[in-house]
Amino acid sequence: MNDLNFDDERILFTPLILYIDYIYLLHNDYLKKTYKDLTPSDVTYLINIFYHQNCSQRDLAELLFVSESNVAQIIKKLEKKEYIVRVPDDKNKSRKIINLTSKGKNTVFMIIKGMYEWEGEFFKDYNPEDVENFKKMLYEYSQKTINSI
């Protein structure tokens, strides 16, 4: 069952989140096959640390809508694998700042490159304006979802 095969009417009446979930599941499968020592969750953390440098465990928990204990477990694992480093915050010694190591940065660059390639295949039959509009709509959808919580 590799094809959803919905008729046009069913496509329009299927909630958008189900399509997003399906894409997410397929992308996670791609990540598992491509990055053997990282889980899809690890990838999410690494990319967010990349985009939010000098963040704390609490910052990540709020950003990813997970508990601080969940963050602590994954951060500990990523630190052991030398993808990240935790250092004391100069302004608050009880707080640890999380950043990527060189290995972590290189891995994130490879992951993002792979994501763009994956996305490129997905969008190859669409014009750039449609892709841009689609991404903007998804971004707005995600922001409205976050703001509704």
Image: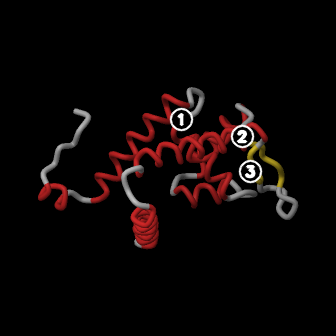
Instruction: Quadrant for the C terminus, please.
Output: bottom left
Dividing the picture into quadrants, the one containing residue 107 is top right
Q: Position of residue 12 (x, y in %)?
A: 18, 61
What color scheme is it? Answer: secondary structure
* Crowd around label 1: few <14 · some 14–19 · many ≥20 (10 Å): some
Q: Is 5 or 73 nearer to us in this picture?
A: 5
Q: Is residue 103 left or right of residue 67?
A: right
Q: Secondary structure at mark 3?
A: strand
Q: How many marks?
A: 3
Can you see residue 145? no
Residue lying at 85% horizontally and 64% vertically, measured from the top left: 91
Can you see residue 30? yes
* Crowd around label 2: few <14 · some 14–19 · many ≥20 (10 Å): few
The amino acid pointed to by label 3 is: Ile
Residue lying at 45% horizontally and 68% vertically, measured from the top left: 136
* Location of mark 2 (residue): 106
* Crowd around label 3: few <14 · some 14–19 · many ≥20 (10 Å): many
Residue lying at 52% horizontally and 43% vertically, measured from the top left: 117
Q: Position of residue 137 (x, y in %)?
A: 40, 68
Earlier in the chain: of badge 3 and badge 1, it is 1
* Location of mark 1 (residue): 39
For the residues bearing labels 1 and 2, Cβ distance under 8 angstroms: no
Instruction: Quadrant for the N terminus, please.
Output: top left
The amino acid pointed to by label 2 is: Asn
Dividing the picture into quadrants, the one containing residue 26 is top left
The amino acid pointed to by label 1 is: Thr
